[in-house]
Image: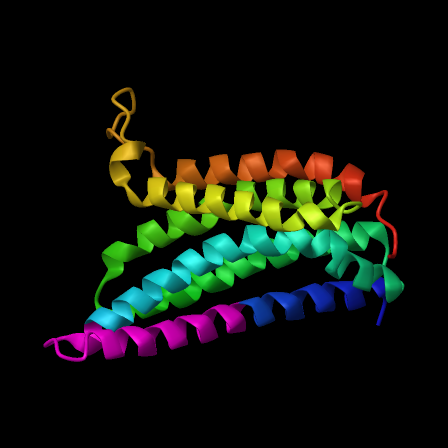
Amino acid sequence: MSLAARSLTYYLKTSVQYIGYSIAISALIFVEFLFIHSGEVDAFGISFRMAVSILALFIAMLNPMYALYSPNWYDGNVLSMGGRRKDIFWGSIVKEILFILMGLIIVSVIYSIYGTPEMIPIAVYLMFGSLPFTGLARIIGHKIRKNGRIAVIAIAIVAGLSAAAASMISNSRLYEFDFLPEGGVSMLLYILIALGIYAVLQIFIYRLCSKAMVR
């Protein structure tokens, strides 16, 4: 297996692990909500809907948080395995986008099976909206690489921004503009804008990755 393929496999496995962690945490939250609402008529349904919604929110928030400490952890692991800096750059992009897509597919399938497809657009807004924050988090991660003591502060900032964005996205009224034909931002346009910002941030990330070293 080539170095590029081995590095890509590493990032693919990491994405799957992220999804597994998110599902495990959501499962624990489901059990907790099940106990809280045990006396209600639709306790299972309420708990299940809450757990799935939290799963979508977790995926949207964990991607930037993982990207934040990736330059201090995962990137060094790839370099120590003989990977190249461009392998880190492309592998990180694959990891971050795949994490979002896998999470979106899982959440959408659950919503569809459970009969709440109207929640799928919210999940789309949440997850794709997290991509610009993910790119920003990687830049911050590279910048604080020399001073790990402020990493906790940076994580809190990124988490706060992600939570604020998630709250804004979940409120559809914030996406209504009178100058648009249909009175709101279409999902496709929203996705393209999010991907565009994410792509622009990759220019700066590429420059930072080119200077990455094993530590």
Residue farthest along the left direction in this orientation: 41
Q: Position of residue 142 (x, y in %)?
A: 74, 44
- Left or right: 96 with respect to 41? right
At 39% from the left and 51% from the top, the residue drawn is 124
Where is residue 144? Give x, y as percent: 73, 43
The residue furthest front is 149
Residue 4, given in percent of the width and then of the height, sits at 81, 61
Nearest to the observer: residue 186 or residue 29: 29
What secondary structure do most residues of the magenta stretch adopt? helix
Is 182 positioned to the left or the right of 146 in the image?
Answer: left
The quadrant of the picture occupied by the N terminus is: bottom right
Q: Please, is residue 37 above or below residue 137 in the view?
A: below
Over which residues does the magenta segment extend? Answer: 19-45
Quadrant occupied by the C terminus: bottom right
Q: Residue furthest top?
A: 179
Q: Quadrant of residue 173?
A: top left
133 inside magenta stretch = no
**Residue 9 coordinates in the image, percent (x, y):** 72, 68
Q: Residue at x 21, y 70 (%)?
A: 46
